[in-house]
């Protein structure tokens, strides 16, 4: 016996004045910002007080870092004072780039033109000798240590024959010290560094002496700040044990893992570097516990599913066992959802287990569905890779208008692999995200139909200059099955709307059944989009989408949508407002989504 939850039915409505208000506000702000930038760009600049005459890239260096006179040099006294300052500051500036014998002069000019600051940098100083010496435990003549020293010397970036620049000199020393302190020697320090410059021969001789100090091994774990949770929770997450050699990346990974746990608002991990305790250096973990329970509400609007409101309840310490409970009630015009999940604490390998249930009602493209689902899964997050293996049972009441009403159920195995490598998870402009998913069910095990669903999606961001981003997206899906009947909609495909084929209503591309659009066994869509950021937070985009969903490959009839829109890096996340034209029917449609949490 199944008990079907009741959800109030919402009907979609045409776009009204309140819905258009945020759209008009975005357009007004974008035009205002663009006008202000244009005025700043075309604003007349004051005439320069001097003209710099120097070879590139010295000229660019001076234009960036040397301050020209604030007022024209109208008399000899002002000219002499400026020339004294120019000799002092420019010599110091050029010395950082390896020029130690420059010629600097202020040349007179006609009355109607500014004086000329002529800079001849002279020969650039090159590195002639490099000496890197190591003291301390790392200097013990043992094959492993000797090999590490040679590796450090080989990685030194400032090679003989290269220009001697102060910045590269400082960066090379910092890299050398960082490489030594990364493993076993956290207390290493540079005892001496010396750069001798022979201006006459334009050569530099470099000496660096590093003292590694003693090799450090992990000692006892000292945990502070716990009141609700047992120390075993923290100790089980440590990627090292007492007596292991110190590795900086291990400590940082341990700290990051604790910081990402919802049970804690902050976490700091520190190892004692006193040479006296180097054989068993204590590792101190200082924690600040987060609020255990939280209730939040939110509201939003999407052209896919209409206006929405939601309430969310989270408990990070259910049954006083650090089990995380999360539940949400979300009411949208075309979809209403009640869901709850239980998540265990991720272990040292980033693996955790989850148990959840969902009840959902949808009314999209004349297809009404009521779905109940329960499942359990094994999840893992390792670096940029996320995996999930789950078993889900669901029952779906499916009622297409003018079609056949049916009740389908399945017990499905579901596998997910997602690889994410982007520069910014919230506002990516460089990198990619790849997702692969395979799921299947059998008539032999609580399913109304035999099927195997396969799905692949790839998104790619490529920066073009400082203000442009090229975005590419593609997805393919195919469900192997004798028929689509008996398979819940989650394991079939529809297309259209945001993040699919814009210019067409949400999930309007699929299989026609009566007057409804239902899921088919085939999906193929793609996007090419070009974004230009006018300011740090506001941009514009042009795009073309193509794709379709159908029941078989030969019935796939890809449609095209194209248009443009506004982008906003809002405090609550990225916002996109797009106006797209569906090439098949020639209609213009607006696509918009925003969500605000309270």
Image (spheres, rainbow, N blue to C red):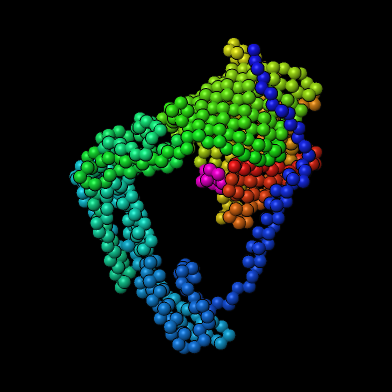
Query: Can you name the residue that lies furthest to the top here?
Result: 444
Position of residue 345 relative to residue 541, above or below, is: above
Q: Residue 440 appears at what percent x and percent y?
A: 59, 20
Residue 423 among those drawn in magenta: yes
- Residue at x 38%, y 35% (from the top left corner): 227
Magenta highlight: main SS: loop
228 and 72: which is toward the camera = 228
Residue 3 is drawn in which quadrant?
top right
Q: Is residue 380 left or right of residue 200?
A: right
> Where in the figure is residue 53, as x and y percent of width and height?
49, 76
Q: Which residues are magenta?
A: 422-430
Residue 500 visible in rendering = no
- How many marks overall? 0
> Residue 550 versus residue 253: which sits nearer the camera?
253
Res 232 visible: yes
Tell me the quadrant of the picture where the N terminus can be found: top right
Q: In which quadrant of the rendered image does the C terminus lie?
A: top right
Residue at the location (74% across, 37% down)?
A: 504
Residue occupying image coordinates x 32% and y 52%: 176
Query: Residue 520's x, y, as percent?
Result: 70, 25
Expressed as whole percent of the image width and height from the top left, the position of residue 209 reads: 24, 56
């Amino acid at each position: 016996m199944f008990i079907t939850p009741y959800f109030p039915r919402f009907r979609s409505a045409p776009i009204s004045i309140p819905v258009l208000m945020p759209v008009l506000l975005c357009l007004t702000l974008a035009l205002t910002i663009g006008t202000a930038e244009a005025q700043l760009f075309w604003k007349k600049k004051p005439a320069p007080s001097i003209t710099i005459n120097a070879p590139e890239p010295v000229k660019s260096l001076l234009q960036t870092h040397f301050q020209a006179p604030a007022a024209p040099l109208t008399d000899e006294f002002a000219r002499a004072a400026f020339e004294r300052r120019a000799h002092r500051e420019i010599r110091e500036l050029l010395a950082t780039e390896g020029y130690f014998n420059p010629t600097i002069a202020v040349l007179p000019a006609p009355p109607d033109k500014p004086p000329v600051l002529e800079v001849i940098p002279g020969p650039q100083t090159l590195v002639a000798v490099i000496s890197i010496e190591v003291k301390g435990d790392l200097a013990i003549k043992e094959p492993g240590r000797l090999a590490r020293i040679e590796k450090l010397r080989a990685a030194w970036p400032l090679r003989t024959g290269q220009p001697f620049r102060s910045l590269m000199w400082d960066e090379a020393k910092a890299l050398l010290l960082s490489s030594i302190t990364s493993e076993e020697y956290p207390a290493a320090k540079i005892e001496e560094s010396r750069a001798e410059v022979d201006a006459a021969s334009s050569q530099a001789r470099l000496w660096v002496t590093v003292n590694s100090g003693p090799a450090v091994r992990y000692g006892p774990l000292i945990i502070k700040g716990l009141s609700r949770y047992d120390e075993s929770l923290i100790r089980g997450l440590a990627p090292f044990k007492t007596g292991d050699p110190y590795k900086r990346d291990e400590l940082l990974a341990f700290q990051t893992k604790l910081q990402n746990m919802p049970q804690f608002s902050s976490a700091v991990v520190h190892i004692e570097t006193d040479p006296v305790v180097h054989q068993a250096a204590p590792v101190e973990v200082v924690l600040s516990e987060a609020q255990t329970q939280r209730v939040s509400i939110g509201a939003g609007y999407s052209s896919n599913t209409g206006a929405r409101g939601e309430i969310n309840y989270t408990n990070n310490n259910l049954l006083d066992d650090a089990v995380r409970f999360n539940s949400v009630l979300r009411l949208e015009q075309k979809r209403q959802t009640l869901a709850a999940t239980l998540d265990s604490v991720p272990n040292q390998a980033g693996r955790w287990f989850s148990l959840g249930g969902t009840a959902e009602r949808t009314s999209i493209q004349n297809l009404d569905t009521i779905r109940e689902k329960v499942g359990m899964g094994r999840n893992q997050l390792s670096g940029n890779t996320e995996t999930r293996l789950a078993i889900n049972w669901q029952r779906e009441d499916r009622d297409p208008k003018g079609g056949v009403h049916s009740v389908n159920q399945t017990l499905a195995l579901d596998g997910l692999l997602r690889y994410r490598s982007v520069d910014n998870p919230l506002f990516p402009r460089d990198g990619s995200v790849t997702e692969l998913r395979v799921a299947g069910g059998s008539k032999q095990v609580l399913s109304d139909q035999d099927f195997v669903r396969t799905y692949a999606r790839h998104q790619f961001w490529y920066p073009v200059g400082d203000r442009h981003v090229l975005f590419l997206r593609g997805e393919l899906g195919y469900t192997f099955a004798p028929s689509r009947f008996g398979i819940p909609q989650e394991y079939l495909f529809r297309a259209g709307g945001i993040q699919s084929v814009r210019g067409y209503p949400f999930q309007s591309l699929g299989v026609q059944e009566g007057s409804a659009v239902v899921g088919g066994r085939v999906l193929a869509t793609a996007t090419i989009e070009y974004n230009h950021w006018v300011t740090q937070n506001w941009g514009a985009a042009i795009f073309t989408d193509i794709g379709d969903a159908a029941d078989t490959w030969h019935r796939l009839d890809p449609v095209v949508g194209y248009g443009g829109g506004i982008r906003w890096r809002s405090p609550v996340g990225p916002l996109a407002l797009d106006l797209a034209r569906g090439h098949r029917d020639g209609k213009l449609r607006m696509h918009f989504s925003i969500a605000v949490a309270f």
